[in-house]
Image (cartoon, grey):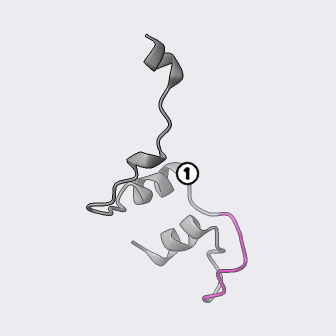
């Protein structure tokens, strides 16, 4: 992943020299989503965080 995309995902300015605490504008949300989809955590189970849909359970 490019530095520009890492900074955009973190909300950091593109023109900073490692000073990522300064927020700015950058890449399109669709571009950032493409990068976020690449992140994987094999074996991580977060199913306990999902809330059941009451409407689905009533059907």
Q: Is residue 22 above or below residue 43?
A: below
Residue 37 at x, y = what percent? 38, 54
Q: Is residue 6 left or right of residue 43?
A: right
Q: Secondary structure at mark 1?
A: helix
Q: Is residue 33 above or below residue 41?
A: above
* Residue at point 43%, 74% (across, down): 2
Q: Callout 1 environment at 10 Å: few (<14), some (14 to 19), or many (20+)?
A: few
Residue lying furthest top in this view? 59
- Magenta part, dominant SS: loop
* Residue at point 47%, 13% (across, down): 58
Image quarter in which the C terminus is found: top left
Residue 16 at x, y = what percent? 65, 83
Residue 34 quadrant: bottom left
Q: Is residue 59 above or below residue 42?
A: above
Nearer-the-camera pick, 38 or 17: 38
* Residue at point 37%, 62% (across, down): 39
Image quarter in which the N terminus is found: bottom left
Q: Is residue 58 left or right of residue 44?
A: right
Residue bearing the label numbered 1 = 29
Residue 20 at x, y = what percent? 64, 81
* Residue at point 45%, 18% (across, down): 56
Nearer-the-camera pick, 33 or 42: 42
Q: Is residue 3 magenta?
A: no
Residue 18 quadrant: bottom right
Looking at the rendered structure, the number of numbered marks drawn on it comes to 1
**Magenta range:** 18-25
Residue 33 at x, y = what percent? 47, 52
């Amino acid at each position: 992943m490019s530095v520009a995309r890492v900074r955009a995902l973190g909300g950091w300015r593109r023109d900073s020299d490692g000073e990522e605490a300064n927020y700015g504008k950058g890449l399109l949300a669709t571009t950032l989503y493409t990068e976020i989809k690449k992140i994987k955590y094999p074996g991580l189970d977060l199913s306990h965080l999902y809330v059941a849909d009451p409407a689905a359970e009533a059907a």
